Amino acid sequence: MKYIQPRPSSIVAALYTARDLEVDVAVLHGPSGCSFKHARLLEEDGMRVLTTSLGENEFIFGGEQRLEEVLIEAETTFAPRRMAVIGTCVAMIIGEDLGQAVHAVETPTIAIDIHAGYPENIDGVIAALQAAAVAGWIGEEELVRQRGLLRAANEVEHLRGAASRPYIEPERGDLKHVAAGRLLELARSGAPGIAVMNAKKETAYMFADALAALHEAAPDAPIRYLANLEERGLPKVRNDARRIAAGLTERHVPFEAVGSLDEYGALGDRLGEAIRSSGATYALVVGVPHAIPAEYTDGIEVISITNGPRQVAPLRELGHRHVLVEVDLHPKTLGARAIVESEFGAVLRSLT
């Protein structure tokens, strides 16, 4: 499919995967402006992102010497435990040998040969994971597992997500106070309900707050809580799951852990079966709601929360009654180490 809407970059995907592998310093081998916004955000999450700042001279004569210089400076200045070199379109076009440059330093360093010309951003993730496997940072079993999860997540996006058509009009979703009022009405009615978090990695720091707020607002309501907080996956993903689970436990949310934070694309049927077998008449589904096929929520009033403005229309097509968007969720959860209050959670609390 040829998209006419912007799509996530494989370079950025490689950056985030390097972070999940607990890389302390990532060096983008390209122009200074390449992936600037995400580089700045990732620095708030504890990973230093440097650039070789390639210019016209390097475009002609090559920039491998410059890359070695930056790596040596990074090693001397920051004393990192792990580093990663991440390619860009410029590095690919001029034929840079990223793997050779990493030998200039003693710090364990991987070279991720990637550019932004791939139609799917998962190629950046796979490139990073393959480099990590070669370096012995992850085992073959985890590499195979991650590939399977990426395929599942990609399939969900193409079937029911923001990649399901060449262009989707971005929307801000329904009014939060209207949806929160309806959810509170349902919870207080005594009807059985279910609240499901199926969140992607660090976004769970805010999506978990919706479950916490619901439990605070209606602690005695017959609601079953599910959250994909099993400790599995890359190092940061496991640590995030542990922290968020602890946060929900501190708030006395009686949740069941179903799946892990990197399995959001593969949990649709499992979570759907749980919804269908629960006997719930309504459901709050947050994170990646479109992973759950519509067949599991037929006849159930669904309130869903996403952080993607282009995901609103597909969720409505799935039959969700209220679709909400947590604006700026991702920047607010980068660097988080505890549950972050959501707009929906704040509104729900204000109604109690």
Image (spheres, rainbow, N blue to C red):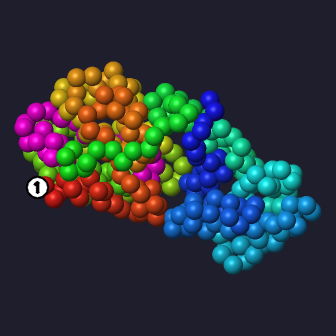
In which quarter of the view is residue 28 placed? bottom right
- Where residue 61 appears, as percent x and y from the top left, is 92, 63
Residue positioned most to the right: 61
Going by the numbered disc 1, the residue's amino acid type is Thr
Say whether residue 277 is left or right of residue 120: left
Q: Which residues are magenta?
A: 180-203
Q: Quadrant of the C terminus?
A: bottom left
199 magenta-colored: yes
User: What residue is drawn where x is 22% and y is 31%?
Assistant: 301
What residue appears at the point 65 percent right and 38 percent down from the top-left corner? 119
Who is closer to the viewer here, 199 or 315? 315
| Residue 106 image position (x, y, % from top left) | 77, 67
Q: Is residue 113 visible?
A: yes
Residue drawn where x is 88% and y is 67% of the image: 57
The part of the image, by quadrant, that contains residue 229 is top left
Q: Is residue 122 visible?
A: no
- Please give left or right for residue 263 compared with residue 82 in the image: left
Q: Position of residue 2 (x, y in %)?
A: 63, 33
Identity of the residue drawn at 86% across and 61% down:
59
Element type where label 1 sits in the image:
loop
Q: Which residue is mark 1?
A: 352
Q: Quadrant of the N terminus?
A: top right
